[in-house]
Image: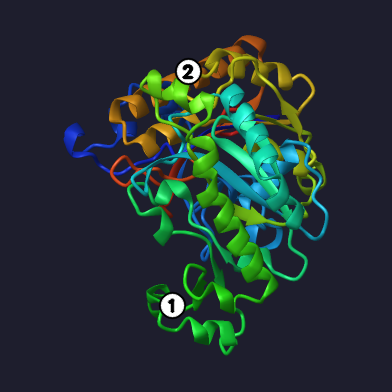
Amino acid sequence: MKYIVILGDGMSDYPVDELNSRTPLQVAKKPNMDFIAKKGVSGMLKTIQDGFEPGSDVANLSVLGYDVRKCHTGRAPIEAANMGINLSNDEVAFRCNFFTEECGILKDYCAGHITSGEGKILIDLLNKKFSDELKAINGKFYAGVSYRNIFVCKVKDAKSKNFVCQPPHNIVGAEIEKNLITVKNDNKDNKDNKSNKDNKSNKDNKDKEINLNSHPSDISNAGLEIAKKLNHLMLKSWEILEKSEINRKREREGKNKANMIWFWGQGKKPKMEEFKAKYNLKGAIISAVDLIKGIGKLAGMDVIEVKGATGLWDTNYDGKAMACIKALDDHDFVYVHVEATDEAGHLGDINLKILSIENLDKMAGKILQEIKNKGIEAKIAILPDHATPIKVKTHTTDLVPFAIYSTKSKDEKD
């Protein structure tokens, strides 16, 4: 028996007024998902553990059966693992988004989906221009896919979990300086916390976060010092990126500029049980994004690269389907991840989300047909990792729908 998971990132949604109070999943033409649901079993699944942010890191780990309370430290170290960045015990990895700033507002969390080639040039520029600042914290920028990059620095005497960093897709349209990194103080009697008692963010936050914009002279704790320097890098990045040739060209072409950086999703190197040891199954992962591939690498699974896989709606769906079928030759379990549905949700684009769902369904159909042609016995699950509703343009903790189909008849046991 083979096992396949087809995952549409952020695929589930809320009823949309423009769709007569139906969801994109309800409206989309998806005969293959309908077949799986009709012939198999279906239900609702909780993928976000209580107390965790509804990120794709937490959700996909949960779908794979991992207890995030034991293995999750943040999304950035997972992405770093796929990029070949070997974190030491005193290093913290941060996701580093390029984003579009306009009049002090975070306008676009993904900088118009800047290309990886453009991003690499800008990352090299940041490492060069920030050389002195980076030496002070042993920091370095690493280029990733599109707007998704990694920043690593040494944090010897501070806990990465104490940095409070807002996911940029959660604060589109918000003022940048009101959402900079703060620090959650473990010691509620700490003098730094008291000195900041008049700051509004402290009044509104039960965890007593210290806002680094006020009373910077009071910052002495190692974590506060690092956070202050990270905020400096984010704000200072505008001076470097705004005038870059890449952004001048993007502006001429009418594209959103990648004129600032944003740190979030931080964490230290995680420890994960290998997938093979956990399930006695040889597993493979197919995805375009570093996060999912990083989960695969940390779990000791084979990460299969597909030419033309972009992480967007123009990804190589057929290539992913055929890579899945080929992987079944020497793997027991294949996890096929599609990012397009999530990106469409973040954009709030109804038609694009419907199109992405329909393309994913065609990919699922190709997998079903090839399994039938080859006589492969398999169980196939299809589901989202979390919801990214059009209305809110960000992730939610809602339960997600799933359907599981087996090629074996119902009276056969497995």
Residue wearing tag 2: 314
Query: How many marks are shown on the rendered structure?
Result: 2
- Which sits in the foreground, 42 or 154? 154
Q: Considering the image in quadrants, where does the N terminus appear?
A: top right
Q: Residue at x 57, y 76 (%)?
A: 217
Residue type pointed to by label 1: Asn
Q: Looking at the image, what colour scheme do you see? A: rainbow
Question: Residue 285's image quarter?
Answer: top right
Question: Residue 327's image quarter?
Answer: top right
Residue sticking out furthest to the bottom: 189
Residue wearing tag 1: 202
Q: Is residue 114 visible?
A: no
Q: Considering the image in quadrants, where does the C terminus appear?
A: top right
Residue 412 lies, in percent from the top left, at 63, 33
In this rendering, position of residue 142 left or right of residue 197: right
Classify 10 Å Cα crowding around label 1: few (below 14), some (14-19), many (20 and above): some
Residue 177 lies, in percent from the top left, at 42, 58
Classify 10 Å Cα crowding around label 2: few (below 14), some (14-19), many (20 and above): few
Between the C-alphas of marks 2 and 1, the distance is 44 Å
Question: Residue 136's image quarter?
Answer: bottom right
- Name the secondary structure under disc 2: loop
Residue type pointed to by label 2: Asp
Check the image and report above or below for 96 versus 207.
above
Disc on the earlier residue, 2 or 1? 1
- Which sits in the foreground, 19 or 239? 239
Does the residue at mark 2 contact the one at mark 1 (Cβ under 8 Å)? no
- Which sits in the foreground, 12 or 134? 134
- Name the secondary structure under disc 1: helix
